[in-house]
Structures are given as C-alpha cells and as structure tokens.
Image: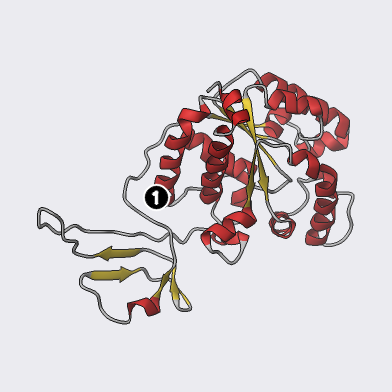
C-alpha cells in the first residue's frame, strides 16, 4: 500500500494572464494548454528573493490540470486514477496532520451510487497506508463471483442487504481500513453500529445532476436499482437518484463527517463540481475527519 510521494513545492491555482502585463524580474514559463485568458497547466516561476545571507532563492509553482472533466467515467467507476504530484504533496501533508487524531480508526465511505466512494477510498487508503475494501466486491466474492446486478436479479435485494450486513460485521472489529460501502448500507441501523464500532463514517455528498451525468456516461446496466425506471440513461438515473436521496438523506446525514462537493467548488473557486479532482475530494475528506475528531464526540471515539 505504500508508495513514494513527490516532494516538490507545488500549488494548484488559476493564473490570470493579464496580471503579467509587465515583465517581472525573473522568469515565468507556462505550459501549452490555454483556456481563454487563463492557464491551468504547468507554471514555473523563478523570482530572485533577497535573504539575510544575500543569496537568491528560486520559487517554483506548478499548476495541475487534472479534474473530473479530464477523467473518464469508466476510470471513476474502477477507481484507477493517479493524482498529479502537487496534489499528492498536499494530500500527504494533510494525512500527516490527521494521523495523530485518527489513531488507526477505520474510515467508511457512504453516499449514493456513483459518488466516487471507490475512487476516493483507494486514494485515502494509499496515503494513510490503510487496507482498502469495497463491500460490494466482497459480497460478489461471497456469492460465487456474481455481480451485484445478478445477485439482485437471482436472489433479490433482501438477500443482498443481508450479505452486506454480514460483510460490515466482519470488518467492524478491524482497524486501519478504508471501506467503500454500497449506496444502501446506511438504511439498516445495525450497519451503523458496525461501521461506527471502530470507524468513522464519511458521507460523499455529490449533487444529483453530476451523479446522473456520471452514471449515464457508463450505462445503467450495473445499477440494479435503476432498472425500474424508464427513459434515457440520464433521465433514469436522475429519477431514481432523486427518490433514493429523499429516502436515504436522513441516514446519510448521520455520518460523522460530510464532504460536500458544492462546498469544495466554493472553496477552490471552480465553476462546476466536475472540475474537482478525486484527490481534492480526498483532501477535503481528511479535513472533515480532522475537524470531527477535534470535537468532543470525535475525541471520545478516538480515545483522546
């Protein structure tokens, strides 16, 4: 699970071209991709800085262009994505800040289908050197490799939910895990008991429109709960997601920490939630976990 993380000083940001109307002392080099009057690529800045020892220092700023718009929906589904090194460093630094409070407690990711639980979970497990588990995958392995859609079709949703509870029970006594749960895992109270026994539950709260777009892009065949709706893939996804959020919203709200993609957009000044990278979501998750663990209830769970 361990991997090297780049240690260069790098910051994701937007650089307005008009700010450089006069050539500064030093040099500024831009990457090749332009977006109207803005650059979102590699920006290397070298300015001489006077220090007490009368030496010049070099500052290098690197701007990343990775976002959900640059990542295919199928990649998000499989959770196979590599973050740019500037985000790696920010993520690594945040994980180091959180670790003293986390104390090895597991992290359970909850949220509607398509919210990126697997993708973000793998990033978190990597940076924390935790083990990663996808509860749906574990269920499939328990039922002779049948897919979730096939389990629903052959055995029914009740059978699947029982298996889901068994999986969460088996994981509940373990620490240092990141677990991506199924969208409906929050419905049963006993599942909450298992997840919060040695873990912290984090809700990935993604706007319905973004979820519907993502699901429609990869098709609805693997989403058994969408088979009951009619219409094109986006319409089917939107209808069902709206119903599920209304049905499960109060359950998701019971999570110890909430990661709102709309809040991330506001913080980073993006125009759309699809501009957010999975690593930026992971960083926000760690920030929310840290904030929770610093509360009285969080400290009690962490044993602080």
Q: How is the image coloured?
A: secondary structure
Number of numbered discs on residues: 1
- What is the quadrant of residue 225 in the picture? top right
Farthest bottom residue in view? 21
Residue 62 in the image: x percent, y percent? 36, 59
Give left or right: position of 265 versus 226.
left
> Is 207 placed above or below 187 here?
below
Q: Residue 183 or 193: which is nearer the viewer? A: 193
Residue 97 in the image: x percent, y percent? 44, 36
Residue 277 in the image: x percent, y percent? 54, 54
> Is 286 placed above or below 63 here?
above
Q: Which residue is mark 1?
A: 85
Give left or right: position of 145 versus 87.
right
Residue under the point 81% across and 37% down: 150
- What is the quadrant of residue 213 in the picture? bottom right
Is disc 1 placed on a helix, strand or loop?
helix
Q: Residue 292 or 276: which is nearer the viewer? A: 292
Q: Residue 268 or 208: which is nearer the viewer? A: 268
């Amino acid at each position: 699970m361990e991997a090297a993380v780049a240690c260069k000083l790098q910051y994701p940001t937007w650089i307005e071209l008009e700010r450089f109307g006069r050539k500064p002392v030093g040099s500024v080099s831009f990457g090749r991709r332009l977006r109207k009057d803005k650059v979102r690529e590699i920006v290397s800045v070298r300015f001489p800085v006077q220090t007490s020892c009368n030496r010049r220092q070099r500052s290098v700023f690197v701007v990343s262009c990775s976002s959900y718009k640059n990542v295919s929906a199928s990649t998000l589904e499989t959770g196979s994505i590599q973050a740019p090194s500037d985000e790696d460093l920010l993520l690594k630094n945040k994980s180091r800040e959180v670790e003293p409070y986390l104390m090895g407690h597991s992290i359970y990711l909850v949220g509607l289908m398509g919210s990126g639980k697997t993708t973000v979970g793998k990033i978190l497990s990597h940076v924390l050197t935790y083990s990663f588990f996808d509860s749906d995958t574990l269920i499939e392995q328990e039922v002779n490799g049948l897919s979730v859609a096939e389990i629903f079709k052959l055995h029914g949703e009740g059978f699947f939910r029982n298996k889901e509870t068994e999986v969460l029970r088996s994981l509940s006594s373990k620490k240092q895990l990141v677990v991506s749960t199924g969208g409906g895992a929050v419905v049963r109270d006993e599942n909450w008991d298992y997840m919060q026994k040695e873990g912290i539950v984090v809700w990935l709260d993604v706007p319905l429109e973004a979820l519907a777009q993502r699901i429609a892009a990869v098709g609805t065949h693997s989403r058994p709960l969408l088979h009951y709706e009619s219409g094109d893939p986006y319409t089917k996804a939107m209808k069902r997601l709206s119903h599920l959020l209304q049905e499960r919203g109060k359950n998701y709200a019971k999570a110890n920490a909430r990661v709102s993609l709309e809040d991330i957009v506001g913080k980073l000044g993006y125009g759309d939630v699809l501009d957010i990278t999975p690593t930026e979501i992971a960083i926000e998750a760690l920030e929310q976990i840290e904030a929770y663990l610093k509360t009285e209830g969080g400290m009690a769970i962490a044993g602080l």
